[in-house]
Amino acid sequence: MALPEIISGQVWTLGPHVNTDLLHPPSHFTPDEKKMREGIEEGILRLGGKVKKEGPEVGWIIVAGENFGCGSSRETSARGLLAFGVKGVVAYSFARIFMRSLINLGIPVFECREIQEHVRNGEMIRILMREGWIETQDSKRFSFSEMDLHFKKILEVGGLLHYLRRERHGL
Amino acid sequence: MVQGITGKIIQDHADGRKEGAYLSVKVDFILLHDPTFALILPELKASGEEIWDRTKVLLTVDHFAPPSSTERANMVKEVLSFAVGKKLPHLSIYQGICHQLLVEGPWLKPGQLILGADSHTVTGGALGCLATGLGSTDILYSLITGKTWLRPPEVVRINFRGNLPPYLMGKDIILDLLGRYGEGGFLYQAMEFFDTDEAISMDDRFAICNMVVEGGAKNGLFMPDRVTEEFLIERDNGLNSSFQRFDEELTYSKKIEMDLSQLKPKIALPHSPAKVVDVEEVDGEPIDTIFIGSCTGGRLRDIEVVSTLLKGRKIAQGVNLLVCPASQKIYLQAIEKDYLTTLIEAGGVVLNPSCGPCGGIDKGILAKDERCLSTSNRNFQGRMGDPSSKVFLSSPLTAAASALTGRIVDPREVM
Ligand code: SF4
């Protein structure tokens, strides 16, 4: 599974320092994928209910502020986002454990410091991997920091478990 | 060039593989606990792989300890049947909070590289090792390979000078740093602490390192010194007095100087551990529940100072004082030293060692609009219960002082 050249989705905006307890409340911890998704739905309510609980067919692209995903390492937050149809995450900056968890699950992350003020919930945006920019609905472009080679290698095979399998068995 | 002790530890553990800015490094020890291990257990089983070295893993059941719902009971059952089936040598069931058990055991030493499936694994850095938390999938990779990928971070050196006055604790120090630099103030960086006057006890160092992740740091580490040495000798009955020393010729990206004698008791306001003010600024704020516990504030010294302050006194009517020792060992010591008798006589309730109220897991979940003063590390909205509840974070001493009146009080007023 190669990393797609273009990732498109509907925008879900989040502010600075959104922690994983808000995004996926600890009371909703569960190993069950369906219930993990419900945890994200609860998180959406707690974050002000700005996006609909039913995801768009195209999937979501989160555009967040500084230090996105700080707090608990509970991977249910990242796994919940995957179950919720998040295709990519753009942020001003990421909390490190959360960023690694997203990548490990095969969700690409992009550091971009300008786009936050220029997108609205629900608009369609596209991330053009090769060109290195994100294009908003009204065709504004914002470049993102180059992704580290190690992260690219994990994402190219679809996540850390696939990376591990390849490392150990060359598959 | 790599920075600090953290950079040296990464270099020492590198196996020669590099991808981008990341180095493949060997891991010395891995910490697992019930919920975060439960997440990857099906994947571990399906992979057909084995844990690379069972002797280098501690598995604790501390979050759902004991479980409060059938879903959680099933998770614990799965985790335990795996652990028993695989004969994991270091298995700890309901014995206390993983981060305390990890430092009580004979495993951690200066210079090591430690991973844990929990963000507060950084606590272990107080012993001079690189200890950091990772998500479950990262931990699964490490359990199978005995390795992980790390990027040598920028390192900030924090020099403490002077003595810690009796009204201050490690918690005040780290809250002060978080307040000054913010929730993302140390993002991707390592924090290395130099206690020039050896004024900070090991329990306070654990509290400081525990909360570096609240500033975004990858890890926090105390330069090993006499306090470290004494702790290790006592912990291991004199067997572990030799450990890796680090020279002072280390490079840092930034230095912060702190005079401990100038500090005032600190408190974090709802809903951020970095929204910090002096306790005296919020003097008189009403509080319903006081929680003394968690991997930040449930150690023996914490219980000792609380008990000393509350001896012969009664907490205010209507206040719930919940005390949760961080481990069974601490629980026993607190019984032996009569601290718990004092706390019970003062009107407190003692909970079994576990995470409990800290993550809103069980025992003491906050009600609608309830106001709590907690010695834990996170006061994020809804973490301890109802989303409308409000949590303040302080040292155990400030928490105990506030229990007396049911209002936030600077401990200097009642000591
Ligand atoms: S005590 Fe709280 S912060 Fe510490 S490990 Fe348990 S839930 Fe996490």
Image (cartoon, grey):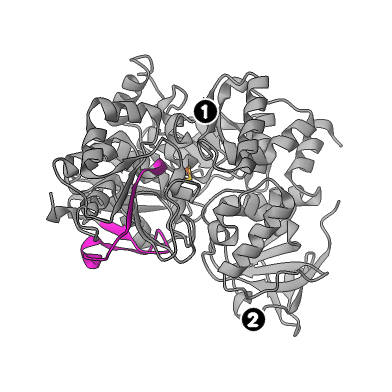
Residue marked by disc 1:
B93
Q: Is residue B28 left or right of residue A128?
A: left
**Between A74 and B8, the one nearer to me in the picture:** A74
Callouts 2 and 1 in the same chain: no
**Between B154 and B57, the one nearer to me in the picture:** B57
Mark 1, secondary structure of its residue: strand
Dot 1: chain letter: B
Q: Is mark 1 within 8 Å of ligand 1?
A: no
Q: Is mark 2 within 8 Å of ligand 1?
A: no
* Residue B86 image-quadrant placement: top right
Q: Is residue B199 among the parts visible in the rendering? A: no
Q: Is residue B325 among the parts visible in the rendering? A: yes
Dot 2: chain letter: A
**Between B169 and B334, the one nearer to me in the picture:** B334
**Between A89 and B65, the one nearer to me in the picture:** B65
What type is the residue that disc 2 sits on? His
Q: Position of residue B357 (x, y in %)?
A: 44, 48
**Segment colored magenta:** B266-295
Mark 2, secondary structure of its residue: helix
Q: Position of residue B97 (x, y in %)?
A: 45, 36
- How many residues crowd around disc 1 within 10 Å: few (fewer than 14), some, or many (20 or more)? some
- Tell me which residue sits at (63%, 76%) in the image: A50
Residue B291 falls inside the magenta stretch: yes
Q: Nearer the viewer, mark 2 or mark 1?
A: 1
- How many residues crowd around disc 2 within 10 Å: few (fewer than 14), some, or many (20 or more)? few
Residue marked by disc 2:
A118
Q: Position of residue B330 (x, y in %)?
A: 34, 30
